[in-house]
């Protein structure tokens, strides 16, 4: 596919990913992600043809205008959509395959200063939630979803959902609606519920077998209630 065909495909792709788009004029004023990708495609070809300084200058100007930082040496496939885009950073050796959706604040960063592959590979049809940080030479499998503000430092298999700091895979199997970020499970809440139930079971066993502990527990409860009462006053 030629350069202009790729750019045209990027513009058409917005209609598939953003229901807020109602006219072609909006593409020129409200979609910095599309313009960042357009400038990247031009700069990437310049970079590959050894016009590296010129490519870097173009992407530097693009960064000032769009607040999106893409290194011209990165590899970005077809129909990649950067939604809103402010704060997105895509490092030099990043590889992004076809159909990936990237939200604002996403970073594809490195964890070393070595001159080698040091940025992530994002497989096709993956969704990267707002603020996600994907660091190092790792691979995010195809059809996967990275939750908002997650920090990913190891590989994520195909058809998976990963959340947390550091991110853990919490669900396997292709998402029916990869854009439904509000349906991610709250793993911290589930862990706290487990711990509270576990403590309650242990307390029941200990108190049942030791009356002295029961008396101490009641004394602590009275102290706690007095503290809360004094705090409210």
Image: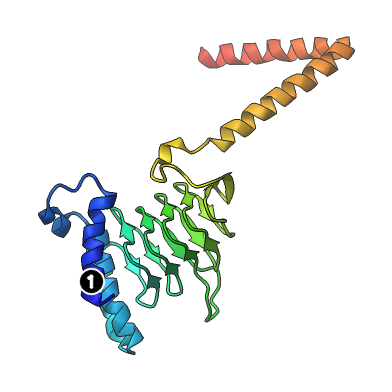
Q: Residues within 10 Å of mark 1 (few under 14, many from 20)?
A: few
Is residue 65 rendered to the left or right of residue 219?
Answer: left
Farthest bottom residue? 50
How many numbered circles does the render carry?
1
Image spot of residue 48 (x, y percent): 35, 85
**Residue 188 visible in the snapshot:** yes
Q: How is the image coloured?
A: rainbow
Q: Quadrant of the N terminus?
A: bottom left
Q: Foreground residue, 225 or 161?
A: 161
| Quadrant in the picture for residue 13 | bottom left
**Vertical relation: 160 (above or below) 91:** above
Image spot of residue 220 (x, y percent): 73, 15
Is residue 33 rendered to the left or right of residue 116?
Answer: left
Image spot of residue 135 (x, y percent): 52, 62
| Quadrant in the picture for residue 59 | bottom left
Q: Foreground residue, 53 or 225?
A: 53
The residue under the point 58% across, 15% down is: 228
**Vertical relation: 110 (above or below) 211:** below
**Residue 56 visible in the snapshot:** no
Circle 1 residue: 5
The residue under the point 27% across, 51% down is: 16
The local secondary structure at tag 1 comes to helix
Is residue 5 rendered to the left or right of residue 205?
Answer: left
**Vertical relation: 115 (above or below) 12:** below
Image spot of residue 44 (x, y percent): 32, 78
The residue under the point 59% across, 49% down is: 168
| Quadrant in the picture for residue 226 | top right
The residue under the point 51% across, 68% down is: 110
């Amino acid at each position: 596919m030629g350069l202009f065909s790729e750019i045209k495909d990027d513009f058409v792709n917005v209609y598939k990913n953003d229901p807020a788009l109602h006219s072609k004029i909006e593409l020129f004023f409200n979609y910095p992600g599309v313009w960042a990708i357009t400038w990247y495609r031009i700069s990437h070809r310049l970079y590959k043809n050894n016009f590296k300084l010129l490519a870097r200058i173009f992407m530097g100007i693009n960064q000032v205008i769009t607040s999106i930082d893409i290194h011209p040496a990165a590899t970005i496939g077809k129909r990649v959509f950067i939604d809103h885009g402010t704060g997105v950073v895509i490092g030099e050796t990043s590889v992004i395959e076809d159909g990936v959706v990237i939200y604002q604040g996403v970073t594809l960063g490195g964890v070393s200063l070595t001159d080698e592959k040091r940025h992530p590979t994002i497989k096709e049809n993956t969704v990267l939630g707002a603020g996600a940080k994907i660091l190092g030479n790792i691979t995010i499998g195809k059809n996967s979803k990275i939750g908002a503000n997650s920090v990913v430092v190891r590989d994520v298999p195909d058809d998976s959902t990963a959340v947390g700091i550091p991110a853990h895979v919490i669900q396997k199997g292709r998402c029916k609606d990869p854009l439904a970020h509000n349906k991610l499970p709250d793993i911290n809440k589930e862990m706290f519920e487990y711990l509270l139930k576990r403590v309650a079971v242990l307390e029941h066993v200990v108190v049942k077998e030791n009356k002295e502990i029961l008396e101490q527990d009641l004394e602590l409860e009275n102290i706690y209630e007095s503290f809360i009462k004094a705090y409210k006053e």
